[in-house]
Image: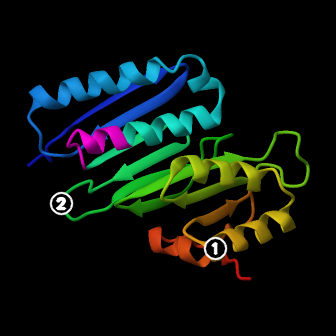
Amino acid sequence: MAFPGAARAEQVSGVPVQVDIRTALPPRELDPVLDDAFTWLRDTGSAFGAKREVREESVERLSRALLAAGAVDHQVRAGNAVRVRGSATPGRRWRVEVRDPGTGRVRTAVYAHDLAIATASAAVNDTRAPGRSVTVVGPDLVMAGAYASAISALGPTMARRFAVRLAEAGPYEVLIAAPERRPVSTPGFAAYGPVGGTLLAG
């Protein structure tokens, strides 16, 4: 039997956006919620596509609005900014593929009931860590995105130190991945799924 809910995927300012609601609400309630969600995202204008921080704040605010509207089980994804709440099916966590922003390659999968997931990559011309991506998970997408962006701009040694200190302070965890290398993560990242790499420690 199919799990109740509704889903929609559209482009907003050139960014692929998916809203997946799994709460058992009647279609007459779910359809207007989805209509309002995409209307609101489009009203953010071109900044949604051009600015990472605008995109992340919009996704976080939309997730809170869905929660307030009674859609307690949902996933909202805009590019590499993801917010999940509730369950994908009764009692089961959402599965979120973490993709490299540059190549689209799936790095790992994160499993969670209530989590913000942001991924950023090093600049194309950054020779210190070519192809490196940084994923940060935690309770707020705006903060997760800011941390991911900051870590991705650092050299490899400083990036690892920053990640360790961030995780020690809580409540955010970090995964750093690079081509042809085993990923490294803070110990708490493993709570959201297998990493298959090296653990960072202080």
Q: Residue at left 29%, top 39%?
A: 66
Q: Give how far apart the Cα atoms at labels 2 and 1 are.
A: 32 Å
Q: Report the front residue among 174 and 130.
A: 174
Is residue 105 visible in the rendered image? The answer is yes
Q: Report the front residue among 119 and 40.
A: 40
Q: Residue at left 67%, top 66%?
A: 183
Residue 116 percent across, percent down from the top left: 48, 53
Residue 84 forms part of the magenta stretch: no
Q: Residue at left 72%, top 46%?
A: 121
| Amino acid identity at mark 2 | Pro
| Amino acid identity at mark 1 | Ala
Circle 1 residue: 169
Residue 186 percent across, percent down from the top left: 63, 73
Q: Residue at left 52%, top 53%?
A: 117
Circle 2 residue: 90
Q: Tell whether 89 sits left or right of 39.
A: left
Q: Which residues are magenta?
A: 64-72
* 34 vs 175: above or below: above
* 178 vs 83: above or below: below
Residue 152 percent across, percent down from the top left: 76, 52
